[in-house]
Image (cartoon, rainbow, N blue to C red):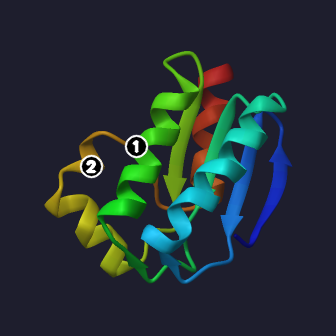
C-alpha cells in the first residue's frame, strides 16, 4: 500500500498512491490506517484523488476504518474521482462519510470549527 502522510494541525492527511482500492488492497489499507490511528491520529483526511476504481471490499475497508476510529475521532474523505464518487452515491455512502471537495476545504472547515 503506497501512501503519503502529511500533518495539517490536527488533521492527518493520507494521500493514497494507488489506482485501486479493492479486495487485493483492502487488508493492507486497513492495516496501514490502524497503525496511524494507534500512533495517535485523531482526525484523518483520506485523499483519494489517484483512486480510479473501488469495489465493495474497498468501500467496506473505509467503513471499517470509520468504525475503528469511533465516534470521538474523525475519518473524512477528499479527492473522489468520478467513478469512486459514483460508487458513493449509488450506495448512499456519501451520506455516511464527510466528503470534502479538496484538502484545503477540509482544512478550512476544521479551522472554522475550532474558532
Q: In the rendered image of this protein, does residue 102 appear above or below residue 63?
A: below
Q: Nearer the viewer, residue 65 or 43?
A: 65
Left or right for 87, reference 16? left
The first of marks 1 and 2 along the sequence is 1
Residue on which disc 2 sits: 93
Can residue 40 be seen from the camera position used here?
yes
Q: Nearer the viewer, residue 8 or 12?
A: 12
Kindly identify the residue that appears in the image at 71 percent across and 57 percent down: 14
Task: Give whichever of 64, 44 is nearer the camera.
Answer: 64
- Tell me where residue 60 appears, x and y as whole percent: 37, 51
89 versus 2 height, above or below: above
Is the residue marked by circle 1 packed among few (<14), some (14-19), or many (20+) residues within 10 Å?
some
Q: Residue at x 36, y 57 (%)?
A: 59
Q: Mark 1–mark 2 contact, CB under 8 Å?
A: yes
Q: Which residue is mark 1?
A: 63
Tell me the residue at 70%/28% (across/down): 42
Q: Whole-percent x and y of residue 109?
A: 57, 38
Mark 2: give few (<14), some (14-19) or many (20+) Cα within 10 Å. some
Q: How many marks?
A: 2
Q: Quadrant of the N terminus?
A: bottom right
Which of the 4 image quarters holds residue 11? top right
| Image-based side of 113 in relation to 37, left or right | left
Query: Taking 35 as reference, is 86 left or right?
Result: left
Amino acid at each position: 500500500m503506497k501512501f503519503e502522510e502529511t500533518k495539517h494541525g490536527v488533521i492527518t492527511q493520507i494521500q493514497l498512491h494507488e489506482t485501486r482500492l479493492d479486495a487485493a488492497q483492502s487488508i493492507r489499507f486497513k492495516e496501514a490506517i490502524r497503525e496511524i490511528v494507534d500512533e495517535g491520529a485523531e482526525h484523518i483526511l483520506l485523499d483519494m484523488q489517484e483512486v480510479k476504481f473501488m469495489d465493495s471490499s474497498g468501500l467496506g475497508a473505509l467503513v471499517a476504518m470509520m468504525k475503528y476510529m469511533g465516534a470521538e475521532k474523525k475519518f473524512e474523505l477528499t479527492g473522489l474521482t468520478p467513478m469512486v464518487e459514483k460508487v458513493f452515491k449509488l450506495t448512499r455512502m456519501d451520506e455516511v462519510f464527510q466528503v470534502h471537495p479538496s484538502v484545503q476545504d477540509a482544512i478550512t472547515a476544521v479551522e472554522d470549527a475550532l474558532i
